Image (spheres, rainbow, N blue to C red):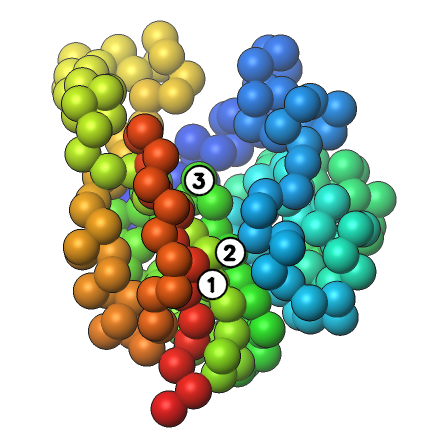
């Protein structure tokens, strides 16, 4: 798991240093995608919210400004956090670490989200366990995953081939995704004390809204 975290950190550090214009697609300020996710409408003003995989701050910054919530951005990449700090002007609290072990007290967040992050981690189920731990009873968690769409399967085959041949450097996004099913995600969430409330299926991904059990 430590090796997985180190490789993930190197991958995101390399993207953070990349100056190509397609960096905007990741969510740099000024790009069309620097917008609030639909998650924002579910968060009450004054809430303390955890963003796991904050990256450039594409969700955390507008969320903190427009919904008047306190966002803690968490990421394993120090280079991404440096960009997020510059983009936010210090308006978002930023913490570096490994999401498999969140450095927060139990029940310290009203809500959490992880967008375009969990499917990069082999042990995303452990991250969900940690999310459940740090959420208050009734706390909201929104996450997204990549399913077994043919395009996703072909991408994974191509990425693994490039890595096996030592050619992953020719495509900067050649990092494996962990594909999964809606059924497995629902089971893991339930096992970790999170009750699924809504599932939004898209072509290549699906998003899940869940609440921390009050029991």
Residue at (68, 59) in percent of width and height: 71
The residue that disc 1 covers is 141
Q: Which mark is residue 74?
A: none
Give the residue furthest to the bottom: 215
Which quarter of the figure has residue 81? top right
The residue that disc 2 covers is 113
Q: Position of residue 188 (x, y in %)?
A: 23, 64
Whether 93 is drawn above or below 160: the answer is: below
Q: Position of residue 96 (x, y in %)?
A: 57, 54
Circles 2 and 3, Cβ within 8 Å, touching? The answer is: no
Q: Position of residue 207 (x, y in %)?
A: 39, 47
Question: Mark 1 or mark 2, which is nearer the start of the sequence?
Answer: 2
Q: Position of residue 47 (x, y in %)?
A: 69, 70
Spatial CA distance of label 2 from label 3 is 10 Å
Q: Nearer the viewer, residue 180 or 101?
A: 180
Residue at (64, 63) in percent of width and height: 43
Q: Residues within 10 Å of mark 2 (few under 14, many from 20)?
A: many
Element under disc 2: strand
Circles 2 and 1, Cβ within 8 Å, touching? The answer is: yes
Give the residue furthest to the right: 89
Element under disc 3: loop
Residue at (26, 71) in percent of width and height: 190
The residue that disc 3 covers is 116
Which marked residue is nearer to the observer: mark 1 or mark 3? Answer: 1
Element under disc 1: strand
Q: Is residue 137 left or right of residue 188?
A: right
Whether 162 is drawn above or below 71: the answer is: above
């Amino acid at each position: 798991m430590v090796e997985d975290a180190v490789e993930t950190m190197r991958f995101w550090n390399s993207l953070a240093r990349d100056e190509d214009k397609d960096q905007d697609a990741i969510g740099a300020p000024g790009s069309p995608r620097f917008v609030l996710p639909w998650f924002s409408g579910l968060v009450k003003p004054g809430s303390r919210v955890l963003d796991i995989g904050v990256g450039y701050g594409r969700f955390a910054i507008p969320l903190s400004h427009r919904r008047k919530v306190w966002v803690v951005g968490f990421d394993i990449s120090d280079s991404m956090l440096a960009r997020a700090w510059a983009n936010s002007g210090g308006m978002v609290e930023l913490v570096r670490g490994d999401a498999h072990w969140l450095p927060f007290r139990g029940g310290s967040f009203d809500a959490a989200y992880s967008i375009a992050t969990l499917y990069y981690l082999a042990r995303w189920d452990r991250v969900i366990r940690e999310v459940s731990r740090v959420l208050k009873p009734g706390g909201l968690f929104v996450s997204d995953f990549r399913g077994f769409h043919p395009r996703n399967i072909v991408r994974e085959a191509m990425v693994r081939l490039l890595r096996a041949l030592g050619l992953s450097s020719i495509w900067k996004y050649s990092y494996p995704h962990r594909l999964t099913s809606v059924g497995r995600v629902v089971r893991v969430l339930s096992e970790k004390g999170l009750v699924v409330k809504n599932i939004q299926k898209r072509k290549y991904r699906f998003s899940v809204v869940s609440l921390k059990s009050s029991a």
